[in-house]
Image (spheres, rainbow, N blue to C red):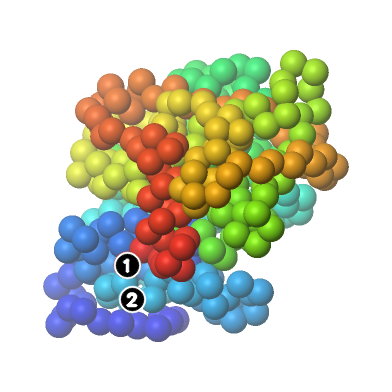
Amino acid sequence: MLIGVQFVASNLYHCIMIVVTGVSGFIASALVSRLNKDRFFDLVLVDDFMGQSDHPNHETSGRNFYGKRFLMCVDRSEFPGWLESNQNQVQFVFHLGARTDTSEQNWEVLKSLNLEYSKRVWKLCSEYQIPLVYASSAATYGGGERGYSDSHSGVDHLHPLNPYGISKNDFDKWVLSQESSPFFWAGLKFFNVYGPNEYHKGRMASVIFHAYHQIKEFGKLKLFKSHRDDVSDGEQKRDFIYVLDVVEACIYLMHHRKNSGIYNLGSGVARSFNELASSVFQAMNIPVNIEYIDTPSDIRSAYQYYTCADMMKLKSIGFNHEFKSLESGVEDYVKNYLEKNYSIY
């Protein structure tokens, strides 16, 4: 079943198509915009279109691909069969669709969407030798006790802190155990991605998104207290990466098509939540005013106090893109998107 077909090519059977899954979401929709910028219009957009009308954030998630140029939409449930029928016209698959709620406790949901469905996509891309980039996650690193190296030898030894991270790590482990694979593939361990098109994510949206709206409404920002003696309030550190930098890596890999493997994708710099907060206040031209609150009990045991991507592996294959600093990324996001209520078009 095809949903919302928008043809921009005169003949489907002469198209060489790029598939992007999870297109109603954050990173995938930004990638579609970036592909359009490079005049890739024969795009096949995949998501749970049939189920979105019942989604509480349907209007804002749908906003993420309106205005984009593409060939057609295919419902997530129909995509494996569609790919099997059209494999000879597909030149690349970006599999970015997943259940991304880190507080999700229903393992059957995560197993179905993040593990079993991804296996189906991998097997089809392997059978028909279609290059594949898929979304992994920095959540696979757990508390970081084994560091943040994306070496394949360390994948079996990681201990994610929540079911979401487990589902992503289980798929990475399964991929590395396979004898057959696409002629090129890459699993990207996204760190803390922020930027336009995350409007629909609710609680799972970035701290920058929530900070902007809190400051706008109340003139102050609430940050989680530290519940560790060796870390001060607000000095928890994460590797924050702007979504526009993330899609540059995806575009690079689409053209590179060699050196298959699992790669970290972060900025390579750990910054504190206090620094992040200061950047948002500065971009909004409002004095810094922070209140520290208890971390919610349902996520406290799985809370990461530090993440930082080791980026040497991706750089070693020639990706030399200069990432935005936290300050410049926040300024662009606040002034050019949040204050104007814009998506990426």
Judge whether 44 appears above or below 232 on screen.
below
What residue lies at 58% left-to-right and 30% top-to-bottom? 272
Q: Residues within 10 Å of mark 1 (few under 14, many from 20)?
A: some
Crowding at label 2, few (<14), some or many (≥20) Cα neighbours within 10 Å?
Answer: few
User: Quick one: which residue is furthest to the right in this view?
Assistant: 297
Quarter holding the C terminus?
bottom left
Work out whether residue 54 or residue 94 is closer to the camera in this orientation and state it.
54
**Mark number for residue 345?**
1
Task: Give the secondary structure at mark 1.
Answer: loop
- Relative vertical location of residue 212 with respect to residue 231 in this rendering, above or below: below
In the image: residue 222, left or right of residue 313: right
> In the displayed structure, would residue 240 be above or below residue 222?
above
**Total numbered labels:** 2
x, y (%) of residue 138? 55, 35
Quadrant into which the N terminus falls? bottom left
Residue displayed at 53% across by 29% down: 271
Q: Are marks 1 and 2 in contact (CB under 8 Å)?
A: yes
For the residue marked with disc 2, what is the amino acid?
Gly
Q: Is residue 237 left or right of residue 338?
A: right
Q: Is residue 251 left or right of residue 30?
A: left
Q: Residue at x 55, y 38 (%)?
A: 278
Indicate the quadrant where residue 305 lies: top right
SS for tag 2?
Answer: loop
The numbered mark, 1 or 2, whose residue comes first in the sequence reads: 2
| 328 and 86: which is toward the camera | 328
Residue to which mark 2 is pinned: 67
Question: Which residue is pictured at 59% across the width and 81% down the height?
Answer: 53
Looking at the image, can residue 185 be seen? no
> Where is residue 247 drawn, in percent x and y?
34, 48
- Amino acid, disc 1: Tyr
